[in-house]
Amino acid sequence: MSDRFLPKAEDRFTFGLWTVGNVGRDPFGAAVRPLMTPSEIVYFLGEVGAYGVNFHDNDLIPIDATPAEKAQILKDFKKALADTGLVVPMATTNLFYDPVFKDGAFTANDPQVRAYALHKTMHAMDLGVELGASVYVFWGGREGVETDASKNPLDAGKRLREALNFLCDYAIDQGYKLKFALEAKPNEPRGDIYLATTGAMLAFIETLEHPEMVGVNPEVAHEQMAGLNFLHHVAQAWDMDKLFHIDLNDQAFGRYDQDYRFGATNLKSAFFLVKFLEDVGYGGSRHFDAHAYRTEDYEGVKNFARGCMRTYLILKEKAAQWNQDEEIQALLQEVLADDGSTDAFKGVYTPQKALALKSASFDRAALGSRGLPYERLDQLTLEVLLGVRC
């Protein structure tokens, strides 16, 4: 029997070199898996059925690599891409790991650090474009503070704006067809990270010189670790035509950044996210920015990667079932019922509409007493997910 949940290229499932290549090191324990080379990771992803691979510059090329070492790594990586058919849809710059970025990159107080961050990013953009990337992500993991005594947030915002304007102009000057995607996170590794939510990023984008080039890369864990509803942030980004990329994983509310397998913790939230992406026709990559449990060897990492993709496809099927369920759709029609009595008030404002609406009468008691069957809707949703509705 064929497995209908096997990934296909059109699913656009991607993983970063840093995800399946994660060796299981954490602040309290050493590595539990051997380090794979970038080309080995590409073959690994080809084996599990991924569509593409993404990278930070130093995931691929170590920060202190010699020109000869860089050339050999690139040769091996390109061969692995050709052998497997994987593509590189997205690239990004590591502006958080090296000690030079301990006070931030684009927002650092030291102007030499800010200049070096631009230098590093331009070279990384060149590398990403060389390998086919069309989206370039910016995650400001060190762009923040532990104490507000150290940095003026207005100055930090101006520095970040100046850096992104510079890099947009660089991309234009080079003829790169790149879209920039900003990734929000409230905290970790900094105590407080600037522009902590997707909504804050969307507002900031409108202050840039080339807002048409810049969107967002929301990540499940980064909103849920702050107890926020990730779906609502994604919907806002989509509504503003700014959902350029998305990072899928899972996260318990109020915890540190866990990067669990997609759907591993909040299955109903994952369901509504998949349903939204499929209903609106999101055409970008479904990028799994997650890590396998530290208990796993590389066979376990394969199970992790396959599990991310399989869960998405199962939830995609469940979303189609939800959309076709007669009882669910009847309940939705009931709560969305419109008898046409307010048609005269809808649409663009006119003085006549305002006057008519002000003089209209409403049966407030009847409106307030109407029952809305959301308990039943939610229960039916659970039953779809639990597989007990045909």
Image (cartoon, grey):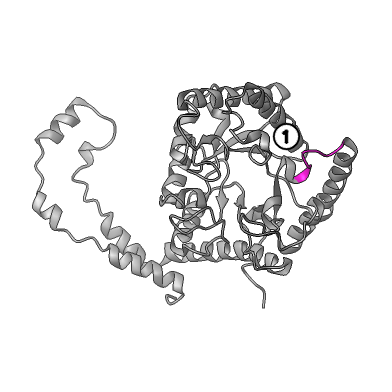
Q: Residue at x 9, y 53 (%)?
A: 365
Magenta-drawn stretch contains 61: yes
The quadrant in which the N terminus is found is: bottom right
Looking at the image, can residue 116 be seen?
A: yes
Image quarter for residue 309? bottom right
| Type of amino acid under label 1 | Ala
Q: Is residue 327 left or right of residue 136?
A: left
Residue 316 lies, with reference to residue 190, above or below; the image says below
Q: Is residue 271 left or right of residue 327?
A: right
Q: Residue at x 87, y 37 (%)?
A: 66
Task: Name the one closer to the observer, 227 or 180.
Answer: 227
Q: Position of residue 198 (x, y in %)?
A: 47, 40
Task: Name the one closer to the observer, 352 or 74.
Answer: 74
Q: Position of residue 153 (x, y in %)?
A: 46, 27
Q: Is residue 351 left or right of residue 21?
A: left
- Mark 1 highlights which residue? 124
Image quarter for residue 177? top right
Q: Which residues are magenta?
A: 60-66
